[in-house]
Every structure is written in C-alpha cells, then in structure tokens.
Image (cartoon, helix red, strand yellow):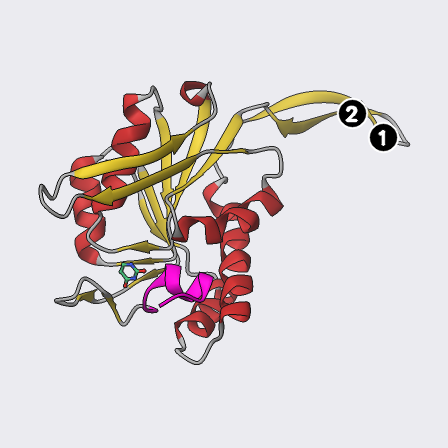
Amino acid sequence: MGKFQVIDHPLIQHKLTMIRDKNCGTKVFREVVNEIAMLMAYEVSRDMPLEEVEIDTPIVKSTQKTLSGKKVAIVPILRAGLGMVDGMLELIPAAKVGHIGLYRDHDSLEPVEYFVKLPADIDERQLFVVDPMLATGGSAIMAIDALKRRGGTNIKFVCLVAAPEGVKALQEAHPDIDIFCAGLDDHLNEAGYIVPGLGDAGDRLFGTK
Ligand code: URA
C-alpha cells in the first residue's frame, strides 16, 4: 500500500486556515493555494534520488550530492488543479506539465476524458497529480487510470484537503500510489462537498459561481 501523509507543517496549517475562511477573496486564495503547493512540493519530493558529483569548491575538490536527473511532470486535473501548478514549479522548475480534463456524462454517468495532453515520456517520469480537493476520489481515480493507460508508473497524488471517503476510494483503486494532503477533513456532505472543507476550490480560485 502506498503511503498516506498529512503534511502538518505549521506554515501549511496556517495558510490552509486562511483559505478555508469564506471571507478570503480570490486574489489571496489563489496566492495562498500556490504557497501551500510550493511548501508541499518540498515534502512530496523528499524521496527524489540523488547521485554524487565531483565539484571544485573555492577550497578543494569535493564529492557532493545532486538530483540524479530524475524527470518530473506535474499533472493538474482541470480545472482546480491548475491553481497548484505554479507553486510546485517554484521548487521543481524543470518539471514538465501535463493536463487532464475529465467530466462525468450526465446520462451514462460514465467518466469522459475531454482533454489529455502529457509529456511523451511519462513512463520515465515521476508524476505528481495535483487537485486541491480529494472528495469522492472519482476524478483522482480516473486521472490516474488515464496516466497508467499511457504508461505512467511512478505516480503521487497531491491535494490540499482530503475527505476520508476519497482517501479510501483512491487507496482501493490505486494501492500503489502515495497520497499527500495538507488537511484530512471530517466527511462529505450530501452535496458532495468536503466538511468543513473550503467550498468549491475551482470557483474560489477563478472567481466563478
Ligand atoms: N470539490 C471542491 O471543490 N470542493 C469540495 O468540497 C468537494 C469537491
């Protein structure tokens, strides 16, 4: 089973409380989502492989560590996942960015991929799938299905707020992936919102209703 981790760093918890507040406006919401994503990037990249290189310091020749060229892609689930991309790129600037857009057909209730654009070599990349809210887990499961169908193997899911129902569903569907969140909330309400949550992350990021 992949790991499930709540990243409970004080800076992240403070910023998460800011964006949960319904009086937090679009500008601050967007900025703080990116700040949290940047702080989370530090933790979710903790097991990136290192290799040794020989360098010249101003004093001596020395063997030191450097990232071993492991390639990364950040894959936001449209639309709310876009809000986390710039923050993650702050810390992993060479990452490629793929996009996955999904909707559920109203009649068949079957998931439909309406947009998938990924780096060609996703089988060689560490993939960070990002979406602020892990609610039922439906879109996360579909997005990871879509990546695996195209050869993705090394996948981590990164969200801000998770519902226990979503974590369970995602772990059951994809037991091999690691799941990271900033907050694990109480439950989903009958409308599918996370409680206490922060409302509709996409609407709050983009100022829509
Ligand atoms: N998606 C959101 O944006 N918010 C929720 O609470 C649940 C799903």
Residue 3 vs residue 160: left or right? left
Report which quarter residue 70 is drawn in: top right
| Residue 137 image offset from top left, x and y in percent | 22, 48
> In front: 62, or 78?
78
In the image, which residues are magenta? 198-209
Q: Secondary structure at mark 1?
A: loop
Q: CA distance from mark 2 to mark 1?
A: 7 Å
Q: Secondary structure at mark 2?
A: strand
Q: Tell which residue pokes out farthest to the right in this image.
A: 58
Residue 190 is a magenta residue: no
| Residue 40 image offset from top left, x and y in percent | 48, 51
Report which quarter residue 191 is drawn in: bottom left
Quadrant of the rendered image holding ligand 1: bottom left
Indicate which disc residue 62 carries: 2
Q: Are marks 2 and 1 in contact (CB under 8 Å)?
A: yes
Q: Which residue is mark 1?
A: 57
Q: Amino acid at mark 2?
A: Ser
Residue 69 vs residue 174: left or right? right
Q: Residue at x 16, y 39 (%)?
A: 172
Q: Amino acid at mark 1?
A: Thr
Pick whichever of labels 2 and 1 is earlier in the sequence.
1
